[in-house]
Amino acid sequence: MKKSNDIRDIFFENIKKKFIKDKNFYILTNDADVHALRSLRNEKRFLDTGVAEQNLINIASGISFKKNTALVYGFCTFLTFRCYEQLKFSLGSHKTNTKVVGIGPGYSFSNDGPTHHGIQDLYLMFLIPEMQVINIADNNLANLVSKNINLFKGPTYIRLDKGIQNFNKKIKYNLSDGFNFIHKNKIKKTLVISSGYFCNLATEVAGERQDISVINFFKMKNFNEFKFKEIIKQFKKIIIYDENTKLGGISPILMAFLNKYNLAINVQILASPDKQTFKYSLERNKILKLLGIYKTDLERLL
């Protein structure tokens, strides 16, 4: 991987290779554009339905119902809220082999307002019983997931950020575990559990301390619960650090997990407020500061 690569380019370059090699692999979009796939737009197996997400999901379902794989990509909010019934029934109920790639999670498109803020879609998709949810934090994981896309059977929602996210190139992710330490200290005092872009901020904060470890929780279902439980039990304090809202991201998933195993641990949550945010900025971190969820706010909890 080249250091200058955008996380989206890494992901979709691998998808492009898969498309060229596998004649049963289809790509569909709702009028979204990514640089790596532009050369495929005239191919018969590349379909742009325009701004018609309900129809898009139904077409993808029909294509992937048999031996084909359909990969759908577009903005997180548009591919989830606009066509939730189709996602639940056309994909979920039929367990079709469709991969839905949501671009623009969190406040990555910070200047476009709440229509583009992907801060509730993660848990929304988690609620579909048959839907696996993968949240990609960095270039390393983007490369691994896209190269092994066939390992995810059935309907899968993949959230993909933008920009150069190279904060942990040496981490050897385990897709079966569904989580990995991305910063580990010997002193087991505080464990920060994060996902997506906030993993980047959490590792920056942990790098300045001797008693903070960080886990990237990237696979929302079918993760290694026993291993996760044994790790959590070693720490005195847990901080769930999430760019999504408290009810729309990893927080309810993790709290349900802690309750399931009766893990009586001090837990604090730092996440987006449960409201629509009418704040606009060309800088993502500026919005995070305004909302009180930036890395300096994480430091105050430690």
Image (cartoon, grey):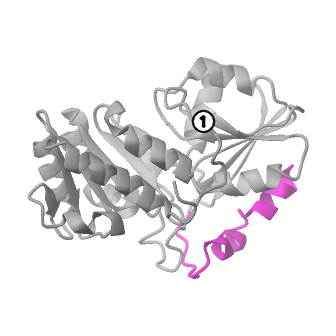
Query: Residue at 17% across / 57% down in the picture?
Result: 56
Report which residue position mark 1 lands on: 172
Disc 1, SS:
loop
Which of the 4 quarters of the picture holds residue 256?
top right
The answer to whether residue 126 is visible is no
In the rendered image, residue 3, in percent from the top left (x then y), is placed at: 58, 61
Vertical order, 151 against 213 (above or below): above
Residue 298 magenta: yes
Vertical order, 261 against 221 (above or below): above
Left or right placement of residue 9 versus residue 223 in this view: left
Query: Residue at 16% across / 59% down in the picture?
Result: 46
Which region shows up in magenta? 275-302
Query: Residue at 46% across / 26% down in the picture?
Result: 222
User: Between residues 251 and 302, which one lies in front from this camera angle?
Assistant: 302
Vertical order, 227 against 34 (above or below): above
How would you rate the neighbour count of disc 1 (Cα within 10 Å): few for under 14, some for 14-19, many for 20 or more?
few
Left or right placement of residue 116 versus residue 274 in this view: left
The answer to whether residue 219 is visible is yes
Vertical order, 90 against 6 (above or below): above
Question: What's the amino acid at mark 1?
Answer: Lys
Left or right placement of residue 292 versus residue 39 in this view: right
Which of the 4 quarters of the picture holds residue 278?
bottom right
